[in-house]
C-alpha cells in the first residue's frame, strides 16, 4: 500500500506542496482556458478530493461554455436563417432597410438601401442628414414631418413617399415606411423601416416604359435651378393617330410596336437627353439649345424616323405627328409651370396646322390662347343661357324644285345678342370637350323641325336633316348610340338624318372612321363628305370611304364660270362622283350662271346664297320661300340677319 | 468503477483486519494492486472481483456485504464529504443530487468515454417534494447497493420512506429504476 510521508511536519510540507501544485495547475484558467485537468499523486484523500472537485468545477465550466456555445451557434443559425429569409423578402420586394438610433441621431442603412441608389455601401452609422440631404428639396420637409410625427406619437407609423437622388444624379421615387420601438415609458429608442423603390409606379409611363410627366417635372426644375442658366428648349412631339396601331391587331402587339417605336425615338436623341412620355401620346425632351436652326437640325433624325411607317403584324402604319417648342432664354428665366405652359401652347398651335408642323412659342401664341379662352367662355356662357342657336340652310333639288335637305348650323349668341359663327369656337369646343353639350343643344332644336307641322306643310315629309360632326365626335365609339338615342327621343326615323364629316376628320384615323361610318350607314343614317375640295383632298378616299353623298366645297365653285381651268376640275370631280354613284351637293352657289352650268352637268342638289343664307330655324317658315332664283333678274329677296 | 467505492471497502478491511488482509483479498481477487484513488476510474471487473473476494474473506454473502458496505459508505462519505450532507435538507434532496455528486467523482477522468460512462450511470426521471424516480444504468448491476444505501440515507435525515425497484437489469430490463417515496413528517 502506498503511504504518505511519515511525520507531521513532513506530511504538512507534503500537503502544502500538493495544494500548491493544484493551485499552479489552476493558473492555466487565467487565459480563459479550462481545457485541462487537475492532477495529484497524493494519497491524501483531502488532496484527491480537492483535485476531484476542481476537476468537477472545471468540467462544469467546460460544459457550461459548450452549452453556451451551442446556444449561441443555434441562435446564430436562427438569426442567420431569419436574416436570409428577411433578406429574401426584402430583395424580392426591392426594399432597403434603415434604422435610426434616436439617442445618437445616427442612422444605419442596409447594403440594399445603398445599392438601390447605386451608392457604395457605408457600413456603420452615419448622420441622418446624409439621407435627408439626398431627398428632393420639395419633399424633404414632408419626410421630416412624417418621421417626427411618428416619433412624437402622433401617427401610428411612418408612411411617406419622396424623390431621392441616386448616384448617377437621377431621381428615384421611394416609399418609406417605418415604426418606432419605445421603452416602458413610451419614449422612442429607435426607429426602423424599409425603403421601397416606387419609381416604376410613379415615374415611369406604363404604356411606353419611358419616364413620365412627373419625372419631366423633376428634370425641368433641376435645369431651372442651375446657375447660370443655359439656353434650353423644351420640345414636345405628339403622335396624332397612335390609335391606328391598335386597329385590327392584338393589343399586346400594338403595345410592343409602340414601345419599339419610342425606343427608336430615344436612340435618335443625344444620350444625355431624356425622352419622357406625357398623356395623349405626347413625348417631351429638354435640349440645351436655344437656337431654332440648331434645334431643327438636332431633331432631324427624329423627324426622319417618324416619317417612316411602323411595322406591325406584317402591315405598315403611318403615324402623323406635330411638335411644339418652348425656348428658354437665360436672360428671361421663367418658372417650370410657365415653361411647360409655353410648350403646351406651341404644341396646341401646331395641332391646328398641317401634319408634321412644328411651332415655336412666341408672344403671339398668348393672343391666340386668349382668344381660345374667350371662345371657351363664350361656349360656356351660351350653354348656360340657352345661347346655342340652330340656323338652317336649305339644299335644294333644282330638278324637282323642292328642298332636299336642311343643314343644321350651329351659332352662339354672345352677350349683347351678337351671333357668332362656328369658325370662332368649334376648335376650342372640340379641344375642351364642350362639343358634345353644344351638339346636344343643337340637336334638341333641330330634330323637332322634322315633326313641326308648319315646316311639314311647307316643305313636306321627305327632306333630310343634315348635321355636322367634329373629329372628336366622329371618333367617339358611342356616336351611333348617341344618334339613335336622339332620334328615338324625338320619334324620327334614321333615314331622315344625315351626318356630315370632313375629310380631315376621317383622315385622322381612317380605319377607325370607316368602321364607325359603316355602322352608321348600316343603321340607315346617311353620310355625307363635307367640304370636299377645300383643302388637301384625296381622290382615293372617294373610292373607299363609306358614304352616300359628296358635298363639293365652295372653293371649287367660286369663279367657275370665269376660270376655265377651275371649270375643268369641278366638272371632273362631279363626273367622278357621278360615276361612283354618290349623291352630289354643290355648296357656295351664288350665281344663276353657276347654277345653269351645274344643271348642264346633271347636278341637282344645290346649297348656297342663291337660294338662301343660313337663317334661324325659328324664322324658317316665315322668311324662306322656295322660288326659282333665276326666273327673275332680281333673284330672291333676301332677309339679312344681324352678324350672321 | 470510481475508486472511491473500492477505497471505502479497503479502508474498512485495512483498519479492522490489517494491511495483510487487504493483500490477501487482492490476491484472491486477482488484483495485485487494488486502486485507492477516489478520483480515478478503475476497471469494473477488478473492482467487482475485489468486492467478491472481500465478501468471502469476511464470510458475508452479497446482501450482507452490501448492507455492511452501505453503512461504511455513509460513514465514509459523511466524514469526507460532509458538505454534501449539509447542503441537502432532506433525504430526497441528497438522493436527488446524487447523480451530480457521482458525476463529480468522475470529473477527473480524461477519457471522454470513461467519463461519460460515469456521468451517465444515474439519471433523475421524476422529482417532487415527496417523490423521486432514479434510473441506474450500469453493467455492474449494483442496484442492491443503492437499495442498501437508501434506508441509511433516510436514517441520516430522520425520515421514513420506501423504495421500490420497478425495473432491474437482473430481471432483463434495460436499466434499474428506483421509485422512492418520502414521508412528509420526520420519523419520531
Image (cartoon, coloured by chain):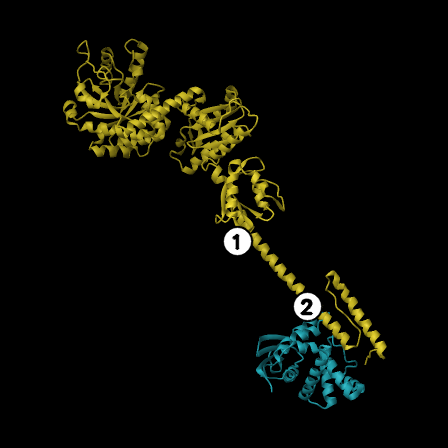
Chain colours: A yellow, B cyan
What residue lies at 67% left-to-right and 75% top-to-bottom? Answer: B101
Residue A51 at x, y percent in the picture: 75, 72
Chain assignment, label 1: A
For the residue carrying disc 1, how many other residues have a C-alpha within 10 Å: few (<14), some (14-19), or many (20+)?
A: few
Decide if residue A525 is on the left or right side of residue A279.
left
Looking at the image, the residue that sits furthest to the bottom is B59
The answer for how far apart the CA atoms under marks 2 and 1 are is 42 Å
Q: Which quadrant is home to the N terminus of chain B?
A: bottom right
Q: In this view, does A297 lie above or below A18?
A: above
**Do the numbered discs 2 and 1 sit on residues whose CB atoms are within 8 Å?**
no
Q: Is residue A632 above or below residue A315?
A: above
Count of numbered circles on the image: 2
- Callout 1 secondary element: loop
Confirm whether residue B29 shows in the render: no
Decide if residue A89 is on the left or right side of residue A439.
right
Pick the front one: A439 or A317: A439
Residue A562 at x, y percent in the picture: 29, 8
Residue B122 at x, y percent in the picture: 64, 76
Quarter assignment of residue A547:
top left
Q: Mark 2 points at which residue?
A: A60
**Disc on the earlier residue, 2 or 1:** 2
Decide if residue A632 is on the left or right side of residue A146.
left
Which numbered marker is on residue A186? Answer: 1
Foreground disc of the pair 2, 1: 1
Q: Which quadrant is home to the C terminus of chain B?
A: bottom right
Pick the front one: A571 or A558: A558
Chain assignment, label 2: A
Pick the front one: B88 or A368: B88
Amino acid at each position: 500500500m502506498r503511504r504518505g510521508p511519515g511525520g507531521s511536519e513532513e506530511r504538512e510540507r507534503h500537503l502544502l506542496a500538493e495544494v500548491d501544485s493544484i493551485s499552479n495547475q489552476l493558473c492555466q484558467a487565467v487565459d480563459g482556458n479550462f481545457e485541462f485537468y487537475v492532477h495529484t499523486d497524493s494519497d491524501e484523500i483531502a488532496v484527491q478530493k480537492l483535485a476531484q472537485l476542481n476537476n468537477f468545477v472545471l468540467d462544469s465550466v467546460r460544459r457550461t461554455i459548450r452549452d453556451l456555445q451551442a446556444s449561441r451557434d443555434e441562435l446564430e443559425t436562427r438569426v442567420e436563417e431569419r436574416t436570409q429569409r428577411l433578406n429574401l423578402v426584402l430583395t424580392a420586394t426591392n426594399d432597403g432597410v434603415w434604422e435610426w438610433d434616436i439617442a445618437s441621431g445616427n442612422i444605419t442603412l442596409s447594403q440594399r438601401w445603398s445599392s438601390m441608389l447605386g451608392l457604395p455601401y457605408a457600413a456603420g452609422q452615419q448622420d441622418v442628414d446624409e439621407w435627408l440631404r439626398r431627398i428632393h428639396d420639395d419633399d424633404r420637409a414632408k419626410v421630416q414631418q412624417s418621421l417626427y410625427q411618428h416619433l412624437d406619437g402622433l401617427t401610428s407609423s411612418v408612411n411617406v413617399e419622396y424623390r431621392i437622388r441616386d448616384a448617377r444624379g437621377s431621381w428615384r421615387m421611394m416609399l418609406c415606411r417605418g415604426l418606432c420601438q419605445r421603452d416602458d415609458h413610451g419614449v422612442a429608442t429607435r426607429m426602423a423601416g424599409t425603403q421601397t423603390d416606387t419609381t416604376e409606379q410613379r415615374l415611369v409611363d406604363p404604356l411606353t416604359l419611358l419616364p413620365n410627366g412627373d419625372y419631366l417635372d423633376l428634370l425641368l426644375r433641376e435645369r431651372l435651378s442651375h446657375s447660370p442658366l443655359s439656353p434650353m428648349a423644351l420640345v414636345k412631339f405628339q403622335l396624332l393617330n397612335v390609335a391606328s396601331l391598335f386597329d385590327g391587331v392584338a393589343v399586346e402587339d400594338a403595345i410592343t410596336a409602340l414601345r419599339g417605336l419610342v425606343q427608336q425615338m430615344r436612340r435618335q436623341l443625344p444620350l444625355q437627353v431624356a425622352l419622357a412620355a406625357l398623356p395623349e401620346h405626347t413625348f417631351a425632351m429638354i435640349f440645351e439649345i436655344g437656337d431654332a436652326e440648331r434645334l431643327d437640325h438636332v431633331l432631324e433624325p427624329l423627324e426622319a424616323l417618324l416619317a417612316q411607317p411602323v411595322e406591325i403584324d406584317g402591315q405598315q402604319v403611318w403615324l402623323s405627328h406635330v411638335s411644339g417648342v418652348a425656348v428658354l432664354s437665360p436672360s428671361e428665366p421663367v418658372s417650370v409651370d410657365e415653361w411647360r405652359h409655353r410648350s403646351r401652347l406651341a404644341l396646341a398651335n401646331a395641332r391646328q396646322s398641317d401634319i408634321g408642323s412644328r411651332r415655336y412659342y412666341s408672344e403671339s401664341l398668348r393672343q391666340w390662347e386668349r382668344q381660345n379662352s374667350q371662345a371657351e367662355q363664350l361656349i360656356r356662357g351660351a350653354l348656360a343661357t340657352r345661347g346655342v342657336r340652330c340656323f338652317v340652310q336649305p339644299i335644294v333639288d333644282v330638278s324637282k324644285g323642292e328642298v332636299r335637305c336642311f343643314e343644321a348650323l350651329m351659332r352662339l349668341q354672345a352677350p349683347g345678342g351678337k351671333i357668332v359663327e362656328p369658325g370662332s369656337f368649334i376648335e376650342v369646343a372640340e379641344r375642351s370637350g364642350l362639343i358634345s353639350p353644344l351638339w346636344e343643344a343643337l340637336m334638341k332644336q333641330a330634330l323637332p323641325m322634322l315633326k313641326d307641322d308648319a315646316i311639314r306643310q311647307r316643305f313636306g315629309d321627305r327632306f333630310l336633316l343634315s348635321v355636322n360632326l367634329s373629329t372628336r365626335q366622329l371618333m367617339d365609339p358611342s356616336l351611333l348610340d348617341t344618334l339613335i338615342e336622339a332620334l328615338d327621343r324625338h320619334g324620327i326615323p334614321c333615314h331622315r338624318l344625315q351626318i356630315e364629316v370632313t375629310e380631315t376628320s376621317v383622315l385622322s384615323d381612317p380605319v377607325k372612321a370607316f368602321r364607325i361610318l359603316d355602322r352608321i350607314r348600316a343603321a340607315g343614317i346617311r353620310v355625307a363628305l363635307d367640304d370636299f375640295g377645300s383643302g388637301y383632298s384625296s381622290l382615293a378616299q372617294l373610292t373607299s370611304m363609306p358614304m352616300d353623298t359628296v358635298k363639293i366645297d365652295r372653293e371649287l365653285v367660286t369663279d367657275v364660270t370665269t376660270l376655265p381651268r377651275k371649270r375643268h376640275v369641278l366638272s371632273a370631280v362631279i363626273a367622278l362622283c357621278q360615276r361612283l354613284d354618290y349623291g352630289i351637293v354643290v355648296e357656295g352657289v351664288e350665281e344663276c350662271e353657276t347654277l345653269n352650268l351645274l344643271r348642264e352637268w346633271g347636278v341637282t342638289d344645290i346649297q348656297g346664297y342663291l337660294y338662301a343664307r343660313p337663317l334661324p330655324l325659328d324664322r324658317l317658315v316665315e322668311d324662306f320661300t322656295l322660288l326659282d332664283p333665276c326666273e327673275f333678274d332680281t333673284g330672291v329677296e333676301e332677309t339679312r340677319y344681324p352678324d350672321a | 468503477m470510481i475508486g472511491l467505492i473500492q477505497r471505502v471497502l479497503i479502508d474498512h478491511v485495512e483498519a479492522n483486519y490489517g494491511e495483510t488482509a487487504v493483500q490477501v483479498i487482492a490476491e484472491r481477487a486477482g488484483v495485485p494492486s487494488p486502486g485507492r484513488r477516489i478520483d480515478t476510474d478503475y476497471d469494473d471487473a477488478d473492482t467487482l472481483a475485489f468486492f467478491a473476494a472481500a465478501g468471502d474473506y469476511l464470510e458475508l454473502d452479497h446482501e450482507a456485504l452490501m448492507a455492511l458496505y452501505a453503512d461504511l459508505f455513509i460513514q465514509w462519505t459523511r466524514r469526507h464529504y460532509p458538505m454534501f450532507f449539509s447542503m441537502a435538507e432532506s433525504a430526497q434532496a441528497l438522493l436527488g443530487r446524487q447523480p451530480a455528486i457521482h458525476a463529480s467523482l468522475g470529473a477527473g477522468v480524461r477519457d471522454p468515454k470513461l467519463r461519460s460512462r460515469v456521468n451517465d450511470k444515474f439519471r433523475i426521471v421524476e422529482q417532487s417534494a415527496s417523490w423521486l424516480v432514479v434510473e441506474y444504468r450500469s453493467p455492474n448491476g449494483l442496484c442492491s447497493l443503492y437499495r442498501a444505501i437508501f434506508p441509511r440515507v433516510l436514517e441520516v435525515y430522520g425520515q421514513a420512506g420506501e423504495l421500490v425497484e420497478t425495473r432491474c437489469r437482473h430481471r432483463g430490463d434495460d436499466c434499474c429504476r428506483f421509485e422512492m417515496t418520502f414521508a412528509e413528517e420526520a420519523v419520531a
